[in-house]
Each structure stands twice: as C-alpha cells, then as structure tokens.
C-alpha cells in the first residue's frame, strides 16, 4: 500500500499544469499605407479597446458580445477574431488580444517539479 501511495505522489510531482486563457483577438486592416490611414487605424484600435471594456462588464460570454457589436465598427467576428477592414483594406495590419485588463501577465504558466528537475 505504501508503494502505491509513493508512486501516486511521485507521479503528481512530475505532472505539469498548463493554463491558458482564451481571449478574443482583433485584426484591423488600414485602407492604405499612408500616414493618415495608419493614424486612423490606431484611433479605431484605441476606441475599440475602450468600447470592449464597457461591453464585457458583467458578461460571461465575451464572444457573444463581439458578435452582437459587429455593426458598431462594420466588422466581422469569425473564429475568435474581430476583424475590421477600413476602406479597401490594402494597408498595414494591426493585431492583438482583446482584454479588459492589460496589466495581467501574458506568459503561460509553467509549473516546476522538484523531482522531475532533480532526475533530469
């Protein structure tokens, strides 16, 4: 019985946990590569981030919120990406994650195992 408990405990020390959050993403494509169009793209990004914080207050399903607000930016929401095309969409592209709090770490959580590190 003691051997089984030891094997289970040793196995638990070797198991690593990987936690990753699912955050929707945005993609904004500028009309052209001119400075005025690029500035417009960044202005739209800033407005989108502010609006997103308001939209998701108290909401569990963030994807549904983005699907409901497609008309606000003439956007499309498919496969977790909120895509905004400005004009002809032949300019630079700006991409990122839509978050409520940007102070959180974006690194993946990696747990260390003392036994695993000691053996290998």
Image (tube, rainbow, N blue to C red):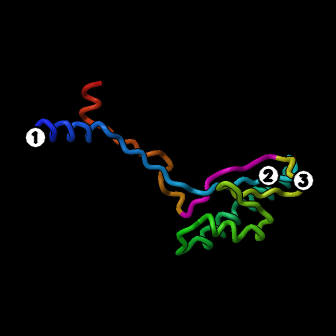
For label 3, the crowd category at 10 Å Cα-Cα, with few meaning under 14, some 14 to 19 and many 20 or more, is few
| Above-or-below relation of 73 to 42 | below
Quarter of the picture holding the C terminus: top left
| SS for callout 2 | strand
Question: Which stretch appears magenta?
Answer: 92-100
Q: Quadrant of residue 10?
A: top left
* Front position in the image: 28 or 119: 119
Q: Position of residue 78 (x, y in %)?
A: 70, 57
Residue 117 relative to residue 102: left or right: left
Q: Is residue 30 visible?
A: yes
Q: Residue at x 60, y 69 (%)?
A: 53
Q: Quadrant of residue 87?
A: bottom right
Q: Point out the tag, 1 or 3, that comes first from the N-terminus.
A: 1
Q: Is residue 34 visible?
A: no
Q: Residue at x 74, y 67 (%)?
A: 70
Q: Position of residue 17 (x, y in %)?
A: 37, 45
Q: Are marks 1 and 2 in contact (CB under 8 Å)?
A: no
* Front position in the image: 93 or 46: 93
Q: Position of residue 83 (x, y in %)?
A: 74, 56
Mark 3 and mark 2: span between their CA atoms?
Answer: 9 Å
Number of numbered discs visible in the structure rendering:
3
Q: Point out the tag, 3 or 2, that comes first from the N-terminus.
A: 2
State the residue position of label 1: 1
Mark 1 and mark 3: span between their CA atoms?
Answer: 70 Å
| SS for callout 1 | loop
State the residue position of label 3: 88
Q: Residue at x 72, y 53 (%)?
A: 27
């Amino acid at each position: 019985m003691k051997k089984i408990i030891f094997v289970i405990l040793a196995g638990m020390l070797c198991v690593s946990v990987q936690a990753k959050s699912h955050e929707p993403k945005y993609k904004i494509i500028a009309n052209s590569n001119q400075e005025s169009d690029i500035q417009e793209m960044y202005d739209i990004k800033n407005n989108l981030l502010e609006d997103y914080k308001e939209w998701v207050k108290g909401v569990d399903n963030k994807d549904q919120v983005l699907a409901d607000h497609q008309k606000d930016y003439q956007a499309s929401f498919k496969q977790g990406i909120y895509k905004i095309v400005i004009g002809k969409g032949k300019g630079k592209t700006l991409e990122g994650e839509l978050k409520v709090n940007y102070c959180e770490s974006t690194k993946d959580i990696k747990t260390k195992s003392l036994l695993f590190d000691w053996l290998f």
